[in-house]
Amino acid sequence: MKRRLGRTSLELSPVGLGGVPLGEIYRTVPEPQARATLEAAWDAGIRYYDTSPWYGRGLSELRFGSMLRQQPRQDFVLSTKVGRTFHRPQDPSIFKGAFWKGGLSFEHRFDYTYDGIMRSYDQSLMRLGLNTIDLLLIHDLDVAEIGSDDLVKQYFTDLERSGWRALETLRHYGEIAGIGAGVNIMGTIPEFLRRFELDFFLVAMPYTLLDQAPLDHEFPLCEERGVGVVIGSPFASGILATGASASEPQYNYLPAPPAMLDKVRRIEKLCVDFGVPLKAAAYQFPLRHKIVASVVSGADTPEMARENAGLVDIEIPNEFWSALRDQGLVHSLSP
């Protein structure tokens, strides 16, 4: 059953495919494998696709577009992001990009000005090979990603002075159906809502089976304004997929601290008691909130794409969710 996204006219499939793994964040992915993964996601019924120019420095968009171009345009929803533009390196022969294991050999520049937003949008259209994009998200506008409070302030100023006008123009003339912003840390949602008329947020870490801090203040703000939410990283960057007993369980892209390992072990015990797969609990938990339209996770194998698509179909008894709350493992306001 598709879900309406905030104030937009769009309905999303409850499971979305994210583009980080096919941008080769952890390992390189051969082209035939990438294509098979995307086709498996489509065949499994996934109809919402989220990518970004940053993922693999353009590679993820190229790969998504190669499959989506073959599908009826009205049958899927596509989002990508703005905030970086990509350029030929000064010396291509020695370029070595940081962060991504693979990806393409282009340099990026942060740019939240009117011209930067429009250039990013045009570049994405060309990489995707599509002449429409449904949703644009303001990407990485927080200190965790930018790395400097001063730069974050500068980029917010650029966005307020001119970049927002570019996004509003695209929305006004129907080139895009909605404007969103990516969220990695608490405090980002109120800052955006104070400044801009957004349609939705993509919340990448703060709302998972392990952390529900947005329920206190940030999600109520969204609900008051009719702003929708898409959840990214439902496995909290790994530990809710691997469990606490993995060799190197990851939480928030770092080795999981002891307190988090203990919490996951307690959740795993309840999963065993109720016969619930941990992955299914992690995936379905965010969808229980009425403002959440879709949960997005990445995949770099066909098997992973099919598994993710099927997690929402696993039946979980209400008693399991009640037990989580009764044992203090989730926020008291968790739906």
Image (cartoon, helix red, strand yellow):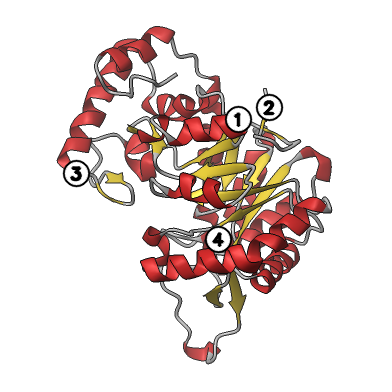
Measured as percent of width and height from the top left, residue 177 is found at: 75, 46
* Amino acid type, callout 2: Lys
* Quarter holding residue 224: top right
Question: In the depicted view, which residue is nearer to us: 103 or 321?
Answer: 321
Dot 3 or dot 1: first in sequence order is 1
Report the Cα–Cα distance between label 2 and label 4.
Answer: 32 Å
Where disc 1 sits, the SS reads loop
Q: In this view, does 228 lie above or below 135?
A: above
CA gap between label 3 and label 4 equals: 34 Å
- Left or right: 248, with 17 as reference point: left
Q: On the image, numbered disc 3 is attached to which residue?
A: 257
With 149 as the anchor, is 63 left or right in this view?
Answer: right
Indicate which disc residue 2 carries: 2
Classed neighbour count for the residue bearing mark 4: other residues with Cα under 10 Å, few (<14), some (14–19), many (≥20):
few
- From the viewer's side, name the closer residue of 248 and 236: 236
Mark 1 neighbour class, 10 Å CA radius: few under 14, some 14 to 19, many 20 or more? many
Determine the secondary structure under disc 2.
Answer: loop
* N-term mark: 1 or 2: 2
Where does label 1 land, which residue?
14
Where residue 120 appears, as percent x and y from the top left, is 66, 68
Q: Badge 4 is on which residue? A: 30
What is the C-alpha distance between the residues marked 3 and 1? Answer: 31 Å
Nearer to us: label 4 or label 1: 1
Could you tell me how far apart the alpha carbons at marks 3 and 2 are, in whole angstroms? 36 Å
The mark that comes first in sequence, 3 or 4, is 4
Q: Is mark 3 on a helix, strand or loop?
A: loop
Residue 281, percent across and down? 41, 24
